[in-house]
Image (cartoon, rainbow, N blue to C red):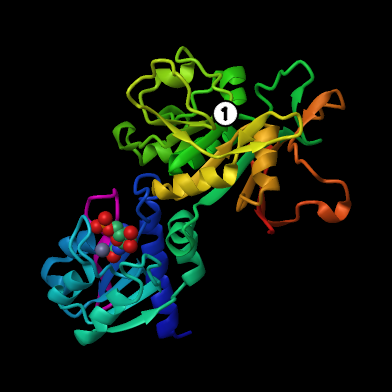
Amino acid sequence: MQTSLQQLHEHYMQRAIALAKKGEYTTSPNPAVGCVLVKNGEIVGEGWHQKAGEGHAEVNALKQAGEKAKDAIAYVTLEPCSHFGRTPPCAQGLITAGVKHVVIGMQDPNPLVSGRGIAMLEEAGITTEVAVLEPAAKNLNPGFIKLMSTGRPFVRCKMAASLDGKTAMANGESKWITGTDARQDVQRYRAKSCAIISGADTVMIDDAKLNVRHSELGFVANDLKQDQIRQPVRVIIDSQNRLAPTLALFNQHSPIILVRTKLENEQQWPHFVKQIQVNAITIADNSSKADLNDLINKLAELGLNTLWVESGARLAGAFLAQGLVDELVLYQAPKLMGENTRGLFDIEGLAHLQDAISLDINDIRMIGADIKITATVNK
Ligand code: AOF
Ligand code: ZN
C-alpha cells in the first residue's frame, strides 16, 4: 500500500509531538513545542523547547540540521513565532535556513503571534499547512492555550478516594488511600503545573509540603534530572490567617502565595512567601471566605496558566460550585470505607438532581491497583 502525503505529514508530526512532550515538565509557562526537519525522506534535525528563555523548538532543530535544513520540510507542533521575545522569531530562522515548506500542528493563540508567523513564512515564498494532528497538538498545552485565548487559566482538580467515594475516616485518618503509582501520577501533574492550589486546612492537617519530589516522579525521573525540576508556585488559601511559619510547607524554599481576604499585622514570613489579597464573600454564619473567581483572575495576571487544585472536600467543592474547574482527576482505590467517613466534594446549594454538576468522562484507566478517571466539567 502506498503512503499518502497526508500520512507522511502525520507521521512526522507525531514525532514532533513526541519531542514536544520531552519539554512538558520544564517549559512552563511557555508551551511545550516540538520540531522535525525532513529532507529526502530523512530526518535531518530534531528539537524541542526545553525552558522559557532558552531556544525554541525550531532553533534547536535548525542547529542540529545545519546546512541540511536548506529545502527541507519543517514539522512544528505550534505556529513558528514572529516576534522578538526572549528569543528572535523562529519564522525568520526557518526563512534564513532556506526551509521550503512548513507543516504546523496548530496556530499560536498568543496575540503577539497568532497568524503572523504563518504570514511571514508565506510572504517569503514558503508554503505552509496548518492543523495537521491539531487535537493532539492542542492537548500538549491546555493551560497555555486557555490563558492566551481567554485570559483564564486551565484548572485541574484532583481528588483521591475509596471505591465508595470516601476520603477519610471519621477520625480524620486518610493516609494512604491510594497506592504509590497514583501518588507518583499526582507528582507528575504537580510538576507540569504552574501552581498548586490548596487550603490552610490541608496544609495544617497533613503538614503538606505541596512540592515536586524527584524521587517520586516514577518513569519521568529517568529523563528529568533533579536540577531540571521547577517547583510550581504553592498557592494557599488562608482567609482566616491561620498558618504559621513553622509548618513543613515553609521548609521548602520555593515560591508560596498566601491568599488573604484581609491583610493584617503579619508574622515574619520567609523571603519566598508573598501575600495577595482577594475579595471576600460573606457566607451564612456571617463569616467570610475567599472569592475563588477573583483569585483565579489574580493568578491569571501573574501568568500562571495551569493550576492544580489539591485540597480537601470543602475547597474542591467550592471550586466546582463556582464553575471554575475545567478537568477533574479522580483516583479511586480498591477499598470500601463505609459510612462513618468523609466524602469527596462538599458542594453547596445542591438540592435537586437537576442541579448536579455534570461531567464528561474522557478517560478511565488502571494506575497500579487504583482507578484513574479524567473528566471534563460541563459548565
Ligand atoms: C515557537 N517555538 O518552541 C515556542 C514558541 O519568551 P519567548 O521568546 O520564549 O516566547 C514565548 C512565546 O513564543 C510563547 O508565548 C509562544 O507564543 C511562542 N512559543 N514558539 O515558535 C517554540 N515555545
Ligand atoms: Zn519561536
Q: Is 53 a magenta residue?
A: yes
Which residue lies at the image location 58% right of the left edge and 42% below the top edge? 292
**Residue labelled 1 has its Cβ within 8 Å of some atom of ligand 1:** no
Judge by depth and name the residue closer to the eye, 328 or 302. 302
Q: Please tell me in which quarter of the rendered image ligand 2 is found.
A: bottom left
Which residue lies at the image location 53% right of the left edge and 36% below the top edge? 197
Q: Is residue 149 visible?
A: yes
Q: Taking 365 as reference, is 231 left or right? A: left
Judge by depth and name the residue closer to the eye, 75 or 262. 262
Secondary structure category for the residue under label 1: loop
The residues colored magenta run 39-57
Indicate the position of residue 284 as horizontal and vertical percent values.
Answer: 76, 34
Indicate the position of residue 231 as horizontal and vertical percent values.
Answer: 39, 34
Q: Taking 370 as reference, is 195 left or right? A: left
Three-letter amino acid code of the residue under disc 1:
Ser
CA neighbours of label 1 inside 10 A, class few (<14), some (14 to 19), many (20+): many
Indicate the position of residue 52 as horizontal and vertical percent values.
Answer: 28, 49
Residue named by callout 1: 239
